[in-house]
Image (spheres, rainbow, N blue to C red):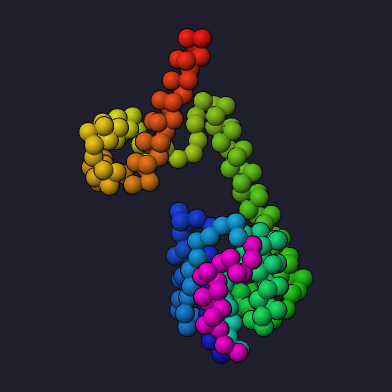
Amino acid sequence: MALIGLVRVSTDKQNTQRQHDALDPICWKVFEEKISGKLATDDRPALLNALSHIRDGDLLTVQEVDRLGRNLLEGLIVLNDLFQRGVGVKVLEGIAAGEHTERSLILDLALALAEDRRRDIVRKTKNGLEAARKRGRVGGRRPVVDDDKRAAVLARRQRGESIRTIAAGVKVSIGVVHKTLAEAQADTQRAVVAAEDAAT
């Protein structure tokens, strides 16, 4: 019997190291996916790749059962699909820790609790940001591009520099340059529309 690991996070910005620390030492192979909003197994290439390496008696292994899906519905869809394919699941941590070959109350409960925990975190974060705004503080991340960098990006673009060159020169990502230019273009268009409205 071999363990085939699956590491999953929803976005590129989330860290997968904790999951790798749990899975890498015990799994024959570990697959990683950064995907959100997909329900079916067939829509998840990394999961399909992991399944293609599973032989009779092998187990798909996750650190916690909610790594199979972001919420109760997604987790249940994936679990049902796995069990229908004859694939067993090994969960390392949480109330569902153990080996599973069919749906059970404990798996359903673990997924429900994980979804509830995520909802609670989102609610507390939102409440904290709202409280900070009322005290005059703006929460969330600091913008990557301050006024000076924004001006530099726009000036360099006006000189005809490529987006890659601008990103290297201003020390920001290519995506940030794209976003800054798009926002500047939108600001210009809004200003033109406002001027036309004022003239009529």
Quadrant assignment, res 37:
bottom right
Q: Residue at x 51, y 75 (%)?
A: 49
Q: Residue at x 55, y 29 (%)?
A: 133
Residue farthest along the top direction in this orientation: 199
Where is residue 113 drawn, in percent x and y?
69, 60
Decide if residue 5 is on the left or right side of residue 111: left
Q: Which secondary structure dominates the residues rendered in magenta?
A: helix
Decide if residue 26 is in sight here: no
Residue 170, placed above or below residue 91: above
Q: Give, as a single range, the part of the protein colored magenta.
A: 39-56
Q: Residue at x 69, y 54 (%)?
A: 116
- Front residue of 63/200: it is 200
Q: Residue at x 60, y 40 (%)?
A: 126
Name the image quarter holding the N terminus. bottom right
Where is residue 195 drawn, in percent x and y?
45, 15
- Front residue of 37/30: it is 37
Decide if residue 132 is on the left or right side of residue 123: left
- Front residue of 13/118: it is 13
Residue 122, placed above or below residue 78: above
Decide if residue 144 is on the left or right side of residue 5: left
Where is residue 175 drawn, in percent x and y?
38, 46
Residue farthest along the front direction in this orientation: 200
Query: How many discs appear?
Result: 0
Quadrant assignment, res 169:
top left
